[in-house]
Image (cartoon, rainbow, N blue to C red):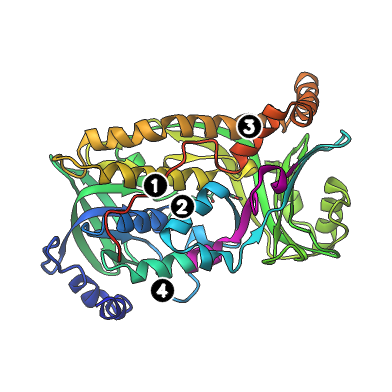
Amino acid sequence: MAQTRNNQRQGDMEPLIKNTMNENATVNSDTLDTDIAIIGGGMVGAAQAALLAQTNPQWRITLLETFPMPEGKPSFQPSFDDRSTAIAQGSVQLLQQLGIWSQLQQHGTPIDQVHVSDKGHLGGALIDRREHHVDALGYVVPNAWIGRVLIAHLHQLANVDIVAPATVEQLQPQASGARLQLRRGERSLTLTTQLAIIADGAQSPLRESLGIDCQLQSYEQTAIIANIGLDQSHKGVAYERFTDQGPMALLPLGGSLQGQTSALVWTQPKAEAETILALSDEQFLQQLQQRFGYRLGRFVSVGKRDSYPLSLSVAKEQIRSSLVVMGNAAHFLHPVAGQGFNLALRDCAALATSLMEKGDSALGALPRLNRYMELQRLDQQATIHFSDQLTKLFSTASLPQAALRALGFVGLECVPPAKHWFTRQTMGAGGRQQVLNPVGGH
Ligand SMILES: Cc1cc2nc3c(=O)[nH]c(=O)nc-3n(C[C@H](O)[C@H](O)[C@H](O)COP(=O)(O)OP(=O)(O)OC[C@H]3O[C@@H](n4cnc5c(N)ncnc54)[C@H](O)[C@@H]3O)c2cc1C
């Protein structure tokens, strides 16, 4: 059955529509019906589909994505680009429960230690996995690989339909459920659903079209990302270095502690970032070396550079009747502490758990969705506050804050509870742990 369905998915429009014929779906030529529609097949939408499919096998889940999502080939949508993601321990547990961690780990590099330092101040804080009795503080996995594994997994799930490429042009809430207008090539389709999950990224035109505002704060910073070749092994050490221009992170890559590549996230004020992006590779490496120092030896090569404007954006509403806003569309964070995807994954697990709870109410009924917000509110607040404060405290040359951050490092090293709290937050254990409790298997 799964094989037939997979073959159908690789075909064109007609087989794909037939694919949704099941007891929960009624189909005519231009109308589809599903239980849960997820708009956006990026890291978060795809993970949400997998978590819902696993915890609630009786539901039909339809994932809608503008870009193609082929099985077994790289996907070129925005989430699965040249970045790498630091996956915290808490997220590893969730991905293990999904049954995809062993594959993700094939290209995952364990983080043995995190070294936090401040340019202009000696020393720094060292967080070591051994102190916390874990195999790794987290893992760094290339986004492209996360995409490959997630998409391949979704293609195996009998209750997930991938409709891609297809763009949702309109979302209309109904008395119960929602109606979506999709564009797929020349064709326009209608999809009705009990619950619509908007995971269409930070700009989220659909969220905007529903009049859901965001609290928006630009950091006036740009993150430059690139893979950096080293003349020695990184030994599994992740570096977080704070400078008065903004934080930079170098995360170990290459699949082993002996790897000689690190993933750079270099935050700069907007204007400086443009100058840096325009440098030759040689000049870029020189500037980076000057800013970072020689803790990782000499930087010998740089891969493709990309840039991301940074802001803090938090949706003022994340739930309405039959509607949930997820991922970057719900909260877009500064990447300094590697929290965005990890938080979103905990959100996805909490939603799957809330929807699983027994009750007579419809899937998109507000009491169920309120339960989700109750589960995640504190975690979201704490995580957003943590990454925002870290960014502000560590991106300034102003005297009081510079003094405070020097004290902060002393505090981090000398006060075990402070270091423990920082570590728990970066390991993704700051929020309530989510345990999936599937009601059936595959
Ligand atoms: C430089 C950088 C480094 C980061 N590092 C980390 C890290 O180390 N750890 C961590 O936890 N997080 C990290 N993050 C955060 C992480 O990348 C985000 O949390 C994650 O990408 C959010 O994914 P998303 O699916 O919500 O949004 P997106 O990645 O924007 O995906 C949205 C998807 O929706 C699709 N779409 C949009 N509109 C429509 C429509 N109308 N119809 C159909 N499809 C549509 C798009 O094509 C896209 O595929 C980092 C972020 C940045 C910028």
Does 137 appear in magenta? yes
Q: Nearer the viewer, residue 154 or 180?
A: 154
Could you tell me which residue is drawn at 62 percent across and 35 percent down?
219
What residue sits right under mark 3 in the picture? Answer: 421
Residue 70 x, y percent position in the rendering: 41, 73
Q: Earlier in the sequence, mark 2 or mark 4?
A: 4
Relative to 1, does residue 389 appear above or below in the rendering?
Answer: above
Q: In the image, is residue 25 above or below residue 323?
A: below
Circle 4: residue type: Pro
Three-letter amino acid code at the position of disc 2: Leu
In terms of depth relative to the viewer, which is nearer, 328 or 426?
426
Viewer-proximal residue among 403 and 216: 403
User: What is the residue that sits farthest to the top in this orientation?
Assistant: 400
Instruction: State the residue position of label 1.
Output: 349
Label disc, if present, on residue 70 of the rendered structure: 4
Which labelled disc corresponds to residue 332?
A: none
| x, y percent for residue 178 | 19, 47
| Residue wearing tag 2 | 94
Are dots 1 and 2 in contact, CB under 8 Å? yes
